[in-house]
Amino acid sequence: MNKLKICVAGATGWAGSELSRALFATEDLELVAAISRSRSGKTVGEVIGMEGLNTPIFGTAEEALKTNPDVFVEYTKPDVAKHHVLVALKNGAHVVVGTSGLSNEDYAEIDQVAKEVNRGVLAVGNFALTVVLLQKFAEMAAKYIPQWEIIDYAHAGKKDVPSGTARELANRLSNIGEAKLEVPLDEIDGPKETRGARLQGTQVHSIRLPSYVISVDAIFGMPDQRLILRHESGSSAEPYVNGALLAIREVGKLVGLHRGLDSVMKF
Ligand SMILES: NC(=O)c1ccc[n+]([C@@H]2O[C@H](COP(=O)([O-])OP(=O)(O)OC[C@H]3O[C@@H](n4cnc5c(N)ncnc54)[C@H](OP(=O)(O)O)[C@@H]3O)[C@@H](O)[C@H]2O)c1
């Protein structure tokens, strides 16, 4: 069987190293290249403690792409993610984006380039199955309940706001409509920031405090009743592995940008 060749940008990181371990255990996927600035020149196995995983680590995407991967996985930081994705597309790879923090404008540009080069990009703010389900349930709720807000919780050191999960949720709900506001934002008394940021028609509030890992609430309110959809992640990167593997296996069937794991799942 011809294995799909995979390059993981960020293979030495918290999420990328868990994915690299899982890739090594599959029979149909081969990790041919990895990217990390501080570990370039080493092998992935040396860095993450996995004997036999001899994949070379490169310092830049341009060097890593010389291995001609079929699929490029972006799992680094938002400041470099768009550049990586565009270079990978121009080198003929399909792309899975796990990195959070890219804007809708970034995604519009990525979509355009992906269509030009006839490649697929699957951007998934959260690969966990339970988050995919939360997104689906929230979409169902928004069809019946016109008022909702999102709260995103993360550890104090998480720089990007809101989380990829919250962004993706707001993006999805915008396809259903804008959350209704009883009091328009320009009519409120007091600091407007306390009402959160309006993101694609949803008020989003980001809390960054020690002791949180990553969680999100989608709150739907109606007179005298309320639905709270809450997702909580633990501290390991394990929940993201299976979804990322699915995205890697399926992205080659897509052209242009697709957001959310459900693009390649059956419901
Ligand atoms: N979609 C999901 O389900 C999901 C799940 C978990 C995390 N995430 C997101 O994935 C991203 C990575 O998270 P993480 O916790 O794994 O981060 P992390 O532990 O800090 O790892 C970041 C990785 O990217 C590399 N990197 C950083 N900047 C780079 C650059 N300029 N060029 C090349 N490589 C670079 C790092 O290596 P060097 O520093 O050596 O370059 C490291 O290997 C974040 O945006 C996070 O929010 C998404």
Image (tube, helix red, strand yellow):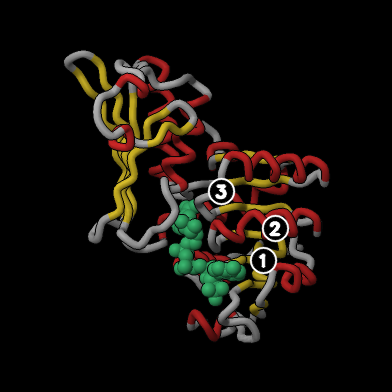
- Between 46 and 196, the residue placed more toward the observer is 196
Please rate how many residues cluster around mark 3, counting C-alpha atoms within 10 Å: few if below 14, some from 14 to 19, many from 20: many
Q: Distance between the residues labelled 3 and 1?
A: 20 Å
The mark found on residue 71 in the picture is: 2
Q: Which residue is drawn at 33% across and 30% down?
A: 149
User: In the rendered view, would you say 215 is above or below 213?
Assistant: above
Residue beneath disc 1: 7
Q: Residue at x 65, y 63 (%)?
A: 29
Q: Where is residue 120 in the image (x, y as percent from the top left)?
A: 71, 45
Name the kind of residue labelled 3 in the image.
Leu
The mark found on residue 102 in the picture is: 3
CB under 8 Å between discs 1 and 2: yes
Closer to the chain start, of discs 2 and 3, is 2
Q: What element carries label 2?
A: strand
The part of the image, by quadrant, that contains residue 136 is top left
Q: Which one is in front in this view, the residue at disc 3 or the one at disc 1?
A: 3
Q: Which one is in front in this view, the residue at disc 2 or the one at disc 3?
A: 3
In this rendering, would 196 be left or right of 135? left
Q: Position of residue 63 (x, y in %)?
A: 75, 73
In this rendering, would 134 be left or right of 221? right
Name the kind of residue labelled 2 in the image.
Val
Q: How far apart are marks 2 and 3 (CA)?
A: 19 Å
- Between 188 and 162, the residue placed more toward the observer is 188
Q: Residue at x 59, y 52 (%)?
A: 97
Please rate how many residues cluster around mark 1, counting C-alpha atoms within 10 Å: few if below 14, some from 14 to 19, many from 20: many
Say if residue 84 shows up in the picture: yes
Q: Position of residue 165 (x, y in %)?
A: 43, 44
Q: Distance between the residues labelled 1 and 2?
A: 6 Å
